[in-house]
Image (spheres, rainbow, N blue to C red):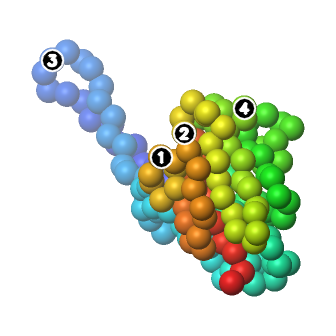
């Protein structure tokens, strides 16, 4: 961010009040508001190296943006409970929010009656089969589901 400059301006209304003008804060590279960053080349290399019958969730937005979560068990729990397999520490996530299920080489996500619901590609779902590139939203976290084809 650039340095801020301050200019003092005295008002002419006779009140003696002082108004300050603050220049805008500029960034060297503007960050679009609300933009979701997809997996980068390093993420894709990790996906390519996945063992068979496993998948990867990549946090593309939310407090853990860039984090990767390996789905390599038949059941992977997600929630705000520290005992969850994937711990998402935010009040928008229920303690026992959802579970990822691996069955016959395919993955599903099932909501566990969470308060804010579980979304797949912006649609509220109780349960959904996952496909490569799907976006799973749990609370304020958006996770891209990636599986090596």
Q: Is residue 96 above or below residue 2?
A: above
Please give the residue where the numbered disc 3 appears in the rendered image: 14
Q: Residue at x 75, y 63 (%)?
A: 103
In terms of sequence position, does the residue under pointer 2 or pointer 3 come before the other?
3
Q: Is residue 17 above or below residue 103?
A: above
In screen coordinates, is 137 left or right of 34? Answer: right
Please give the residue where the numbered disc 4 appears in the rendered image: 95
Q: Residues within 10 Å of mark 3 (few under 14, many from 20)?
A: few
State which quadrant residue 67 falls in. Answer: bottom right
Please give the residue where the numbered disc 1 appears in the rendered image: 124
As drawn, the residue found furthest toward the top would be 15
Q: Residues within 10 Å of mark 1 (few under 14, many from 20)?
A: some
- Residue 125 appearing in the image: yes
Tell me residue 21's x, y (percent).
32, 40
Tell me residue 35's x, y (percent).
45, 61
In terms of sequence position, does the residue under pointer 2 or pointer 4 come before the other?
4
CB of mark 1 within 8 Å of CB of mark 4?
no
Please give the residue where the numbered disc 2 appears in the rendered image: 117
Count of numbered marks: 4
In screen coordinates, is 42 left or right of 3? Answer: right
- SS at badge 2: loop
């Amino acid at each position: 961010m650039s340095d801020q400059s301050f200019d003092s301006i005295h008002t002419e209304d006779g009140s003696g009040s002082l108004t300050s003008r603050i220049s805008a804060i500029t960034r060297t590279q503007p960050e679009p508001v609300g933009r979701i960053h997809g997996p980068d080349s390093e993420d894709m290399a990790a996906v390519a190296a996945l063992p068979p019958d496993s998948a990867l969730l990549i946090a593309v937005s939310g407090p853990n943006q860039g984090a990767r979560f390996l789905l390599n068990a038949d059941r992977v729990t997600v929630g705000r409970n520290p005992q969850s397999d994937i711990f998402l520490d935010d009040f928008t996530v229920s303690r026992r929010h959802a579970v990822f299920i691996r069955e016959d080489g395919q993955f599903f996500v099932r909501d566990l009656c969470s308060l804010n619901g579980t979304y797949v590609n912006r649609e509220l779902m109780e349960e959904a089969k996952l496909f490569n590139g799907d976006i799973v939203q749990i609370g304020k976290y958006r996770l891209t589901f990636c599986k090596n084809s």
